[in-house]
Image (cartoon, rainbow, N blue to C red):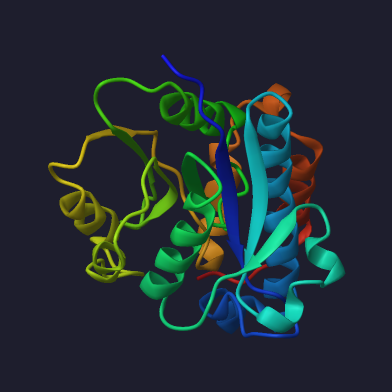
Amino acid sequence: MVSRQGAIVIFVKTPGYSPLKTRLAQTIGQAQAEQFHRLSAAAVAAVVQKVAQQKQVTPYWAVAEEAALTDPLWHQFATLFQGAGDLGTRLAHVNRVLSEQHDFVIFLGADAPQLPVTYLTDAVDLLTNVTDQRQFVLGPADDGGFYLFGTPICLSQETWLNVPYSAANTAEKLLAQLEGQGDIQRLPALTDVDTVRELQTIIQEQSDDDKLLPEQRQIREWIRQQNFPGD
């Protein structure tokens, strides 16, 4: 086996530059939706940082707004611009840029702050050790999307564009695009947050308190302290 060096990239939007968490904001208000995004991104970043201290990976923020690349909110990791266009176009762009510098790329959203360190470690391990068969890694989300995707190759733009995003079959369609290109390893499913109801769900998924990072405990306590209306 050959050791490989990869990238882990978290896709984010920047408060004050773009509308974000619009469905959540309809229920709890824009200010609290932005606060959730900040806390959730910080929790995901803490998980990435923990893994980066143990594995040969480089963390990045993929920022939606070019003007916000130097925003203090994203000081922790190197930043790159997602590029223009729809999500498929932006995923393809980031995949291409990072694949020029790294042997594999793991994509993360910023909306599953309960992500266990072990899930991300497992994804890195699967992509780090080269075998005869190419391997992809998918972390499915309960709504039909995915909270994590890892690829050892630069997928074609056509592959990314053939996936319907924010749909009940997003993960299924991505897997269909990968058919015949290699093995696909699945991680356990998690909830990513789009609505107020899912805020309570992610607390339930933070079941092993001893393994939570401080940033994960912080967002859990923030959720518990809010008086959110029903969804």
In this view, the residue farthest toward the left is 180
Report the quarter where the N terminus lies.
top left
Q: Residue 87: horizontal and vertical position, in percent?
A: 42, 73
Q: Is residue 66 left or right of residue 146?
A: right
Q: Who is closer to the viewer here, 91 or 165?
A: 91
Q: Is residue 49 visible?
A: yes
Question: Residue at 67% of width from left, 38% of height from top?
Answer: 47
Q: Quadrant of residue 199?
A: bottom right
Task: Residue 160 in the image: state x and y as whole percent.
Answer: 31, 64
- Residue 214: x and y in percent read 81, 38
Pick the residue in front: 225 or 151.
151
**Where 149 sits versus 135, above or below?**
below
Residue at (75% x, 84% y) in the render: 16
Q: Is residue 188 above or below residue 139?
A: above
Residue 134 in which image quadrant: top left
Q: Count the marks: how many?
A: 0
Q: Residue furthest front?
A: 100
- Between 177 and 211, the residue placed more toward the observer is 177
Q: Is residue 229 left or right of residue 190?
A: right
Q: Position of residue 43 (x, y in %)?
A: 71, 47
**Which residue is drawn at the image coordinates 43% and 30% (left, top)?**
127
